[in-house]
């Protein structure tokens, strides 16, 4: 099993809050197109069959919002109030059609009741939190039994050159907002999330769309 935390946070995400608040005015420019494939692929796997209440964890500036079906109720949280401000501006620009609620909240200590959402999705956040195992535990807790849990992220592959480079470079990347030495797929598989499929995308297939479920009780 890979290491549990990125060592770049205190578990309540405060240092990441500062980094992403700093990025907020130009986040879309840097991370918009670069991470778009993973967001788009993930949202195509969201079960669109019925009206859903979906939680997006670490919604950032809301770049995924356009990919959701119009009839779902989206709740987005982020540790950074400035990122949430940007997401609110985007919602205002989008106009009517979606029901969207945005809140500042720590993904590792969410205030939602157990079993609140039909689906929980989180693109490119798990390598930014201080305790990724607790992050998964919280996603499980707030998801309804049988609900979808979708995590998107780059994931260290110990057998590949990029994996080795990522391990060396991780302390640098941690300073700019994420770690590169976490085997996300392995970590998620060791939680109670029932992983059904892992789809490769983006940069040399280093990014993974992890399709999981909360087990039925
Ligand atoms: C790389 S960005 C991804 C944003 C968005 N999901 C996207 O696809 O563009 C990581 C986001 O996670 C947020 N974040 C970091 N730690 C967090 C935490 N503990 N709780 C909630 N959000 C967190 C950051 O503020 C930032 O908006």
Image (cartoon, rainbow, N blue to C red):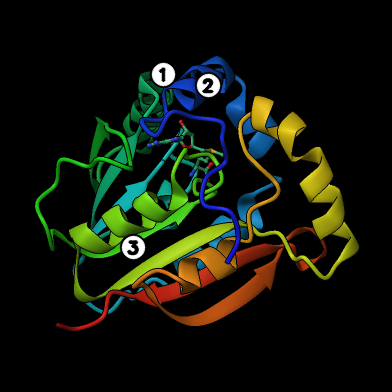
Mark number, residue 69 = 3
Q: Quadrant of the N terminus?
A: bottom right
Would you say 143 lies left or right of 62 here? left
Q: Quadrant of residue 195?
A: bottom left
Q: Nearer the viewer, residue 96 or 204?
A: 204
Neighbours of disc 2 within 10 Å: few (<14), some (14-19), many (20+): many
Rounded to the nearest angstrom, the CA distance separating label 2 from label 1 is: 6 Å
Rounded to the nearest angstrom, the CA distance separating label 3 from label 2 is: 26 Å
Q: Nearer the viewer, residue 90 or 107?
A: 107
Rounded to the nearest angstrom, the CA distance separating label 3 from label 1 is: 26 Å
Residue beneath the point at 71% across and 45% down = 34
Residue beneath the point at 32% across and 74% down = 48
Would you say 13 lies left or right of 125 here? left
Of the residues tagged 3 and 2, which is closer to the observer?
2
Q: Nearer the viewer, residue 156 or 100?
A: 156
Q: Are marks 2 and 1 in contact (CB under 8 Å)?
A: yes
| Residue wearing tag 1 | 82
Neighbours of disc 3 within 10 Å: few (<14), some (14-19), many (20+): many
| Residue wearing tag 2 | 24
Q: Work out whether 84 lies above or below 115.
A: above
């Amino acid at each position: 099993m890979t290491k549990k935390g990125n060592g770049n946070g205190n578990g309540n995400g405060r240092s990441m809050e500062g980094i992403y608040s700093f990025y907020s005015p130009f986040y879309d420019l840097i991370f918009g197109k670069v991470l778009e494939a993973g967001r788009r692929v993930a949202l195509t796997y969201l079960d669109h069959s019925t009206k859903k209440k979906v939680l997006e964890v670490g919604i950032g500036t809301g770049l995924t919002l356009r990919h959701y079906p119009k009839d779902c109720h989206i709740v987005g949280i982020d540790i950074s109030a400035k990122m949430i401000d940007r997401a609110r501006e985007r919602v205002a620009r989008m106009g009517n059609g979606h029901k969207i609620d945005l809140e500042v909240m720590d993904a590792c200590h969410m205030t939602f009741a157990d079993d609140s959402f039909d689906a929980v999705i989180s693109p490119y956040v798990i390598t930014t939190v201080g305790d990724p195992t607790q992050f998964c535990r919280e996603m499980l807790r707030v998801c309804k039994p049988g609900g979808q849990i979708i995590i998107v992220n780059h994931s260290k592959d110990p057998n590949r050159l990029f994996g080795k480079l990522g391990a060396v470079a991780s302390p640098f990347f941690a300073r700019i907002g994420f770690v590169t030495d976490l085997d996300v797929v392995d970590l998620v598989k060791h939680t109670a999330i029932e992983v059904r499929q892992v789809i490769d995308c983006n940069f040399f297939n280093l990014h993974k769309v992890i399709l999981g479920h909360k087990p039925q009780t």
